[in-house]
Amino acid sequence: MSDPQGNHRTLTLTLAETDALAAEAHAGQTDRIGVPYVEHVRAVARALAPAGEHLAQAALLHDIVEDTEWTLDGLLAAGVPAEVVTLVDAVTKKPGTAYADMIRRIAADEGAALLKIADNAHNSHPDRLAALPEEQRARLAAKYEDARTVLWPVVDPALLRTVVGRINPSLLDGP
């Protein structure tokens, strides 16, 4: 693609185009409580909007490599900005990696940590947890709380409060 001066440039997806890509990729998928999966990634993106467009785009795509046929190279080829693909890669589960190890790896990058915090906060929302069987609810609540002890300290406190306040303010009232 060329700009008006004839210089070659790569097509870069907008936030709206990234949303459409995510909606198509997750079409027909539902989350643990039976809600269309795209609603989860959109909620995480809305929470991250104050942190910038790249984080919102990464939020829309944060589970795409794990849960669909999309690859990191495919995202780049589709015009997803490299910075966004790097964030998606940072939060993508790697085969054979324990959850706690993944959280420590994510904590090494503030942007990735903020993305995972927003994901965790949405998954920890009382309304969402209440829809799960008690055993699963307790297990996930403990898992997400453990992750917060690692992730929250590495993010700017004001931005953390803004993002978490947008997606799950009940977490700000706790210990």
Image (cartoon, rainbow, N blue to C red):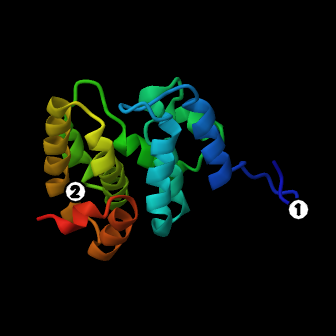
In this rendering, position of residue 131 left or right of residue 38: left
- Name the amino acid, label 2: Leu
State which quarter of the image contains the C terminus: bottom left
Q: Residues within 10 Å of mark 1 (few under 14, many from 20)?
A: few
Q: Position of residue 108 (x, y in %)?
A: 25, 55
Going by the image, does 173 lie left or right of 95? left
Above or below for 1 versus 163: above
Residue 4 in the image: state x and y as whole percent.
Answer: 88, 62
3 or 17, which lies in front? 17
Disc 2 crowd, CA 10 A, few/some/many (<14, 14-19, 20+)? many
For this view, does 54 lie left or right of residue 93?
A: right
Residue 60, image x and y in percent? 51, 46
Secondary-structure class at tag 1: loop
Residue shown at the point (52%, 23%) measured from the top left: 69
Residue located at (26% from left, 62% from top): 170
Q: Nearer the viewer, mark 1 or mark 2?
A: 2
Q: Is residue 86 visible?
A: yes
Residue of label 2: 151
Vertical side of 65 occupied by 104: above or below:
below
Q: Is residue 85 visible in this depiction of the protein? A: no
Q: Amino acid at mark 1?
A: Pro
Q: Is label 1 in contact with label 2 (beta carbons under 8 Å)?
A: no
Q: Which badge, 1 or 2, is on the more N-terminal residue?
A: 1
Q: Which mark is residue 42?
A: none
Q: Is residue 149 left or right of residue 37?
A: left
Residue under label 1: 4
Q: Quadrant of residue 47?
A: bottom left
What residue sits 13% from the left and 43% below the top? 142
Q: Identify the element where label 2 is drawn.
A: helix
On the image, the x and y values in percent for residue 12 come to 68, 51
